[in-house]
Amino acid sequence: MVESGVFGKKTGAMAKRVLDFYEDMRYKYLSALEDPKEYGNEWKAAVKRIRTDFDSLGDFSAELKKYLDEDNVFNDEVNNPQSNAAEKLYNSVKKMRFKSDEMNDPFAKQMGDKVVETLIKTPSIYAMFLHYALRAHTHSIKEKSWKAHDLKPDEITQGAKGLDLKLDDIPLYIIEHYGDNADTTRVKSKFKGALNLLEQVFLESNDSDKWDELIDVQIKKDDKDEDEKEEKSEINFIVPNKPMYRIFEIDDIKELKGFSGEYLVQEKFDGIRIQIHKSDNKAKIYTYNEKDITDKCKDIVEKVEQKRFGDMILDAELILYDGDEPLHRADTIAHLFKGKYKDATLKARVFDIMNHDGKDLADSPLRERINILFYQLSPGSSDLFNFPSKKNSRIADSIKDIEKYGKDIMSSKTAEGVVIKDIESTYYLGNKKNPKWIKWKKFVDLDVIVLDKKKTKSNLYSYTVGVGPLDGEQSREHNGTEFEGKTYLPVGKALNTKQSVSIGSIIRVKVDEVRRKGTGYSLYSAKVIEIPEVESPEKLITLELLSKEGRKSLKYDVQDALLKYTITDGIHGKADIIMKSDYEGFTIYGFEGDELMQKNALADMDMWKEQITEMIKSYTSDSRVAIKNFLHKEGKPTEVKDIFEFMVKNEPELTEKLWDGLFTKFSKWIDDYDDFIQVSPTTYIDNDLKVIKDEESTGDSGSYRMYVRKDNNIEFIINYKDKDMIWIIDIEDAEDIYNLFGKAGKFPAQVGKKSQPDKLLDKGEVILGVQKHGYHEYKINGNKFKTRLHFRVVPIKDEDKWIVWTGFKQTMLDSKEDEGIWDIANDRHKKLAMQIA
């Protein structure tokens, strides 16, 4: 969510609490409304929180009582997100957000939930909002300035403290804060016109310098001259190299082959990767994904453009400093793209060079490249623009020296580890992974559950975190904490973070060390780094593997009930995951041995969990096919015990893997699938109308291509049963692509007739889910995007329109909803256009 200075000192705390409360309830209600099975428990927890706050004492409780009806809050039906009671409760919370006297939001107070609609319809009010959003003070534009353009004066924002937002952030702020149940598709397209109007009005009583100071950003113009376009096209951007290997202990290097034996040990900075280009005395700076950030690094650019430096392409890291204190990577990103820290300073730390004075150095050995940096460029090193030195780049010819230098370098505040590079390595063009580079990080990333939350006087948050859930035996051995019927083991605290999450949320922390503490474990120096896209925390076994006592060997006997699943990433070797599974899921007990692949498997656990899940799906699919064939052959109602005995005799391995060989588990399993019809309490027949979809088959899958069209919209082409079908998705700029695939934003769409591809965006496999009139579901597995797409007809301003969005839940809808209308040309809504009449 875009942050701002919207809250004054007097009402700031309460206003922020009201807004945070609304955003949390909004997400949980809308998620549960769309998918009650997946998100229903989160909504119930939210209702429980509302009831607790309602019955408490204090200002927030009093504010709740002004807008929420007590009978409705404590109505049992409110726990059902699809009930009228839940809808009423959510609307009451929304009313509090827009109408509360605690909210210092003049637009919400006057317009309620019609802010977006009003801004789009009335350019002058949109212009007033832009001034309110850009300014940091309480003064609106003078009355005479508006009247000079025959417009009503600004009586909305006078006296309200401005939001002090960056110009580019304003459309997103409007969508996030006012966009619920509103058509936000024209917020961005109307933005430029409102900005032009604001400029005209503003300049009636201010000079151009004041205008430049207000917007504080270089506005991107559509009509760039040809010289600018030509300059952009000549950028020789090089895909940044990353280490192919990762080690966890220094002895792990012994397992890696093909190195010369001499290495450069360099600091791995905790910032963001940048590439610096200098040509004809002009400098440009790009992020790792080729985003031009030159205007955001003006002080560094001034240093780069000094005459002492010739033409060059440099590999570097950008770090934000508060005085002499380096800040975290997240702070660097927030400052770079949102201008969050006004008194902080960006500094560049160079570590490699790919071109110098017109000479291409990519194919030159690192020994030559580092010598250029050391002896030719480092004399011009400065605090803002810093070249490698003996402090952060050391040459080693033994593992002992690598360890010594690595530990010395990692003592730096700016280091998150070191990169160990073969001194003879070249810079691999067009390849992100360099097979001669090794990453050694000084901390471990772990996903943990928040078990308790405290807020400091400085508005920071501290969390008690845990792992689990614990099974029965682990619960008896450890003193755990119960949350929502499950027991978790507390393992320490993550202190003083700006990230605010609720109890029960999963956060990702980096830790310097995991230690055994009595019968439990403790995380040292745990710092919150991000909110991961995972649904469960680490298991207890993860901490055992990472703790000093348990890391070298597994204290688990591999019994017959445990499975070995061999995995490889094609780089670090092979590993055997020790696990136990059934049809409800699986438990990973760890890895055999102490090889490098096992450690990398632990670091990439989420990826392997997905692969194991797919493996278990294939077991389920095989079992369903076997049972259907058996029942079909029997041709009559068959006792469930006889079906189980058939599987024990003919498919013993599947019986063990899915149901632990237990009849009780099997009887629950068979009752979950509509492939089988229950005739009596103890007998089943084959459901001839239900055809099993092989999870790995291509019967319901095809291919897709996704382009940016010549009209700058997205073209999603599906090839299925030798037929091309085209969806057109309405976007306004590249950021919308991220909002569609990364933030589940909703965008207009329509069935396309003619292909107009311009630039390939992605391609891959597509799986067709539910296909019916007015709704089409796809799961795409491409090079860039792996997600679930929905196209649905919804009423917008009394007109039916197609909209598209990506789903939070990645499992497909129940096939019982399917009507088989896979050809979108046969959908009765195929003629609906994106534009609103």
Image: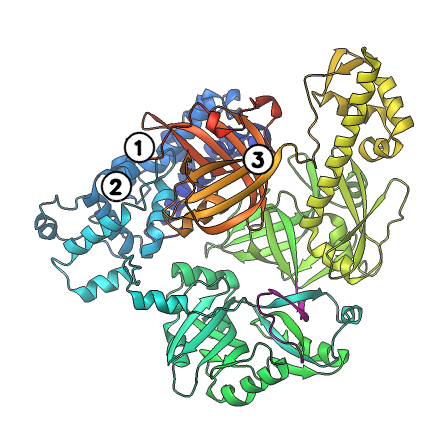
**Residue at 30% across / 63% down in the picture?**
218
Query: Mark 1: few, some, or many residues within 10 Å (few <14, many ≥20)?
Result: few
Considering only order in the chain, which callout, 2 or 1, is on the residue closer to the N terminus? 2
Residue 347 shows up from this direction: yes
Q: Is residue 639 magenta?
A: no
**Residue at 31% across / 52% down in the picture?**
163
- Label placed on residue 722: 3
| Percent coordinates x, y for residue 829 in the rendering | 42, 25
Q: Which residue is mark 1?
A: 836
What's the magenta region? 423-443
* In-front residue for pair 386/42: 386
Horizontal side, residue 181 vs residue 641: left or right? left
Q: In the rendered structure, which amino acid carries the disc numbered 2?
A: Leu
| Percent coordinates x, y for residue 826 in the rendering | 48, 25
Q: Is residue 700 above or below residue 423?
A: above
Query: Mark 3: few, some, or many residues within 10 Å (few <14, many ≥20)?
Result: few
| Percent coordinates x, y for residue 701 in the rendering | 62, 36
| Percent coordinates x, y for residue 255 in the rendering | 80, 68
Q: Is residue 135 above or below residue 436?
A: above
Callout in the foreground (1, 2): 1
Callout in the foreground (2, 3): 3
What's the CA distance linking mark 1 and mark 3?
Answer: 33 Å
Q: Quadrant of residue 828?
A: top left
Q: Which residue is mark 2?
A: 119
Mark 3 falls on what kind of element? Answer: loop
* In-front residue for pair 709/151: 709
